[in-house]
Image: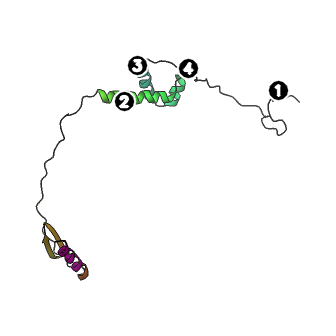
């Protein structure tokens, strides 16, 4: 029974593929061809691509790979950054530091011990065994 359907190479036992095929889109093969682009062409295409907004649609419309357009855009940005004059080519900048006045002791401090430039403050709420351990550690290190 011929329904006008091409069935050569199809599985006729299971019925797979026996329905009419919908619209097929033929994509042009891009393999095997290498074009050269001038700098002016690249700049013009990148500018048009930026205005278009849809890179994939722009690439299909102009028969060029979208990855190539992204590469051109990235290279253009690098070239623009490299062409800018440097801000200041001097040594490292130093910022003056102003020391604050020492903070007044809080009312919580019960003991303040200074040994070899180190200051240990033990608060009123500290447990006695912790205070003892800290003071013993200071004696050992002397």
Question: Circle 3 sits on which residue?
Answer: 39
Q: Which secondary structure, mark 3?
A: helix
Q: Answer whether labels 1 and 4 touch (C-beta < 8 Å).
A: no
On the image, the x and y values in percent for residue 95 come to 15, 46
**Figure colour scheme:** rainbow
Q: Quadrant of the N terminus?
A: top right
Which is more foreground, mark 4 or mark 2?
4
User: Can residue 111 be seen in this snapshot?
Assistant: yes
Q: Is residue 141 magenta?
A: yes
First in sequence, mark 3 or 2: give its number.
3
Which is more foreground, mark 3 or mark 1?
3
- Name the residue furthest bottom: 128
On the image, the x and y values in percent for residue 44 come to 42, 21
Please name the predominant secondary structure of the magenta segment in the image.
Answer: helix
Which mark, residue 123? none
Dividing the picture into quarters, in which one does residue 129 lie?
A: bottom left
Q: Answer whether labels 3 and 2 touch (C-beta < 8 Å).
A: no
Q: Residue placed at 85% from the left, 38% from the top?
A: 13
Q: Residue placed at 21% from the left, 74% from the top?
A: 137
Q: Residue placed at 49% from the left, 30% from the top?
A: 67
Question: Circle 4 sits on which residue?
Answer: 33
Question: Circle 1 sits on which residue?
Answer: 4
Q: Which residues are magenta?
A: 131-142
Q: Which secondary structure, mark 1?
A: loop
**Does residue 61 sit above or below 103 in this rendering?**
above
First in sequence, mark 4 or 2: give its number.
4
Q: Answer whether labels 3 and 1 touch (C-beta < 8 Å).
A: no
> With 92 as the anchor, is 65 left or right in this view?
right
First in sequence, mark 3 or 1: give its number.
1
Question: Circle 2 sits on which residue?
Answer: 77
Mark 3 packing: few (<14 Cα in 10 Å), some, or many (20+)?
few
Which one is in front, 59 or 135?
135
């Amino acid at each position: 029974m011929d329904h006008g359907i091409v069935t050569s190479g199809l599985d006729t036992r299971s019925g797979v593929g026996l329905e009419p095929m919908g619209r097929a889109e033929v994509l042009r093969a891009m393999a095997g061809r290498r074009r050269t682009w001038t700098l002016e062409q690249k700049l013009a295409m990148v500018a048009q691509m930026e205005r278009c907004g849809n890179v994939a649609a722009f690439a299909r419309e102009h028969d060029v790979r979208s990855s190539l357009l992204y590469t051109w855009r990235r290279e253009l940005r690098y070239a623009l950054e490299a062409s800018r004059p440097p801000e200041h080519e001097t040594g490292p900048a130093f910022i003056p530091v102003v020391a604050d006045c020492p903070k007044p002791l809080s009312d919580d401090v019960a003991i303040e011990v200074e040994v070899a430039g180190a200051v240990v403050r033990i608060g009123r709420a500290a447990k006695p065994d912790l205070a003892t351990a800290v003071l013993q550690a200071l004696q050992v290190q002397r």
